[in-house]
Image (spheres, rainbow, N blue to C red):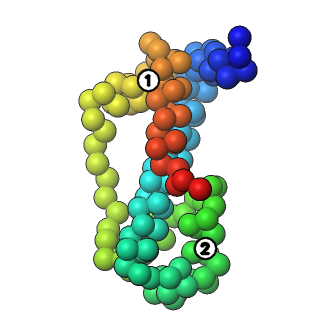
Amino acid sequence: MTSTSAFWDDLARDLEDSEFLREFIVESMRIATIDEVVNALDDAREAAGMSKAELARAIQVEPATIRRLFASDTSNPTLGTLAELAAALGMRITIQPLDDDERRKVTEPLLVGRSADPAGLARHLHGLRERTQVPA
């Protein structure tokens, strides 16, 4: 048994606990969503040819605030800050429904507190996070 498979086995076992499952889903979705929005805003900033300092001035915050937002793996900006950044870039933040497959994988287990496939759920949520990472 490799340490990687032991990790997935342990996580799948932990996901049998409804409280852990709900918290894991919520945090995984929160992280993936914030990463996706922040990365999209940084891409839009670059496409607009705007520096981080210029963007900071546009929303009247310190340049270090914007540098940290776009550089940190642990940023947790407010929706208000994201909306201000989006507006300064000619965009807005919107929400969209999950497709049917993701609703089955994420929403249903979140609502009922259990998953028919805990290991599959763990891998799916991990995959969401991996897709939102900016390559180094």
For marks 2 and 1, the one nearer the N-term is 2
Residue in front for this viewpoint, 32 or 3? 3
Q: Amino acid at mark 2?
A: Arg
Q: Amino acid at mark 1?
A: Pro
Q: Is residue 114 visible?
A: no
Q: Residue at x 57, y 34 (%)?
A: 23
Badge 1 element: helix
Q: Is residue 4 left or right of residue 39?
A: right
Disc 1 residue crowd, few under 14, some 14–19, many 20+, Cα 10 Å = many
Give the quarter of the figure containing the N terminus.
Answer: top right
Give the quarter of the figure containing the C terminus.
Answer: bottom right
Q: Residue at x 39, y 25 (%)?
A: 105
Q: Are marks 2 and 1 in contact (CB under 8 Å)?
A: no
Q: Residue at x 42, y 66 (%)?
A: 43
Q: Is residue 97 visible?
A: yes
The numbered disc on residue 133 is: none
The numbered disc on residue 67 is: 2
Badge 2 element: helix
Question: Which-is-in-front pick, marks 2 and 1?
Answer: 2
Query: Disc 2 and disc 1: Cα gap in Å?
Result: 36 Å
Provide residue 78's location: percent of width, then percent of height. 51, 64
Provide residue 34's location: percent of width, then percent of height. 49, 54
Q: Residue at x 48, y 24 (%)?
A: 121
Residue in front for this viewpoint, 77 or 89? 89
Provide residue 35's location: percent of width, then percent of height. 50, 54
The numbered disc on residue 109 is: 1
